[in-house]
Image (cartoon, helix red, strand yellow):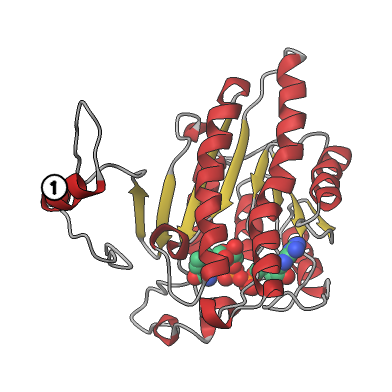
Amino acid sequence: MGLLDGKVAVVTGAGRGIGREEAITLAKNGAKVVVNDVGAGLHGEAGDLTPAQEVVNTITAAGGEAVINGDDISTWAGGKNVIDQAIDTFGSMDILVNNAGILRDKMSFNMEESDWDDVIRVHLKGHFATAQHAAVYWRGRAKAGEAVTGRIINTSSEAGLFGSAGQANYAAAKGGIVSLTWVLARELERFGVTVNAIAPRARTRMTDAVFPEMAKSDDGFDKFDPVHIAQLIAFLASPEAHDVSGQIFVVFGGDVWAMSAFRPVGELHSATGWTPEDLVAHKGELFKDHPSTVPPFSFF
Ligand SMILES: NC(=O)c1ccc[n+]([C@@H]2O[C@H](COP(=O)([O-])OP(=O)(O)OC[C@H]3O[C@@H](n4cnc5c(N)ncnc54)[C@H](O)[C@@H]3O)[C@@H](O)[C@H]2O)c1
């Protein structure tokens, strides 16, 4: 018996990296999987479907069920096609893992319009294009009186939680994905759907050049193997996580953090409002327990 027996999953960007491990792990736990990937280059260059087909082959060789989908999930039609393919092939769609992504890192003063548009489109629109069509499907089933146990697991990043220099496009998209996660969690709760997001760290082509410290460790535990990310995904996708929604997790190796939403760190109150001069006078009070300068990148 697998934790996900009878479930149908869509994993976007599942041809390589983290998505590959997510697709294989969901299948190992009993889910039937639509392996979506356009096979893009790291920066979104034209694609090759071979890696996604190899993931399908790996799953089926191990006795699981999987099909390939080569749609571009950053389009409305692509988002619909991948959800429809799951329903048409396997009879339902229960788990949506939004993972596909590209990078175009540049400082804001060097960034071009296409760098901004493409990264926002693939990550932010790519998350919503699939989720919107999944939401239509689950709402329809719930309204028809069926029991729905839908799951959406989005992929944010610490870049989005803390705002990384050199990634205005990427960090803005990943921050937007956190807000989108909270919106969808509120909207879809009534239909039996949970929506969560992860901010992972793993060794993939996306991190190879930037984080050499993620190179394979030789102490017996490969902390940055993307397979560790996939375990949290399988948990969140399972019926046992029915009461976990609207949550953001930082995850890598053996470490999982549940992160809090924004909370006030200082406050001022006046029954008659504030003038700029008043705020000058009370600045120290507003920031008495919290520095007023640029926050640290990470809290770890
Ligand atoms: N690796 C990390 O440490 C890390 C950290 C934070 C966030 N992430 C996020 O995790 C996700 C996976 O990243 P990865 O490191 O595995 O990168 P990766 O480059 O190995 O994999 C991304 C996959 O997405 C696919 N893709 C790109 N555009 C697509 C589109 N329009 N439609 C369908 N598929 C598309 C690519 O072809 C590729 O196979 C991304 O959203 C990334 O931003 C990764």
Please say whether residue 70 is visible from this viewpoint: yes
Image point 17% across, 55% down: which residue?
A: 290
Q: Residue 138, located in which quarter of the rendered image?
A: top right
**Dot 1: within a 10 Å radius of its alpha carbon, few (fewer than 14), some, or many (20 or more) residues?**
some
Residue drawn at the location 25% of the way across and 33% of the way down:
273
- Residue at figure coordinates x 53%, y 83% from the top left: 208
Q: Is residue 167 left or right of residue 43?
A: left
Decide: is 275 above or below 229: above
- Amino acid identity at mark 1: His
The answer to whether residue 226 is seen in the rendering is: no
> Height in image: 273 above or below 17?
above
Disc 1 is placed on an element classified as: helix
Q: Position of residue 229 (x, y in %)?
A: 49, 59
Give x and y (percent) for residue 118. 71, 68
Residue nearest the viewer, comparing 17 with 207? 207
Q: Nearer the viewer, residue 251 or 209?
A: 209
Tell me the residue at 24%/42% (across/down).
Answer: 275
Q: Is residue 204 left or right of residue 33?
A: left
Where does label 1 land, which residue? 282
Front-lying residue, 136 or 162:
162
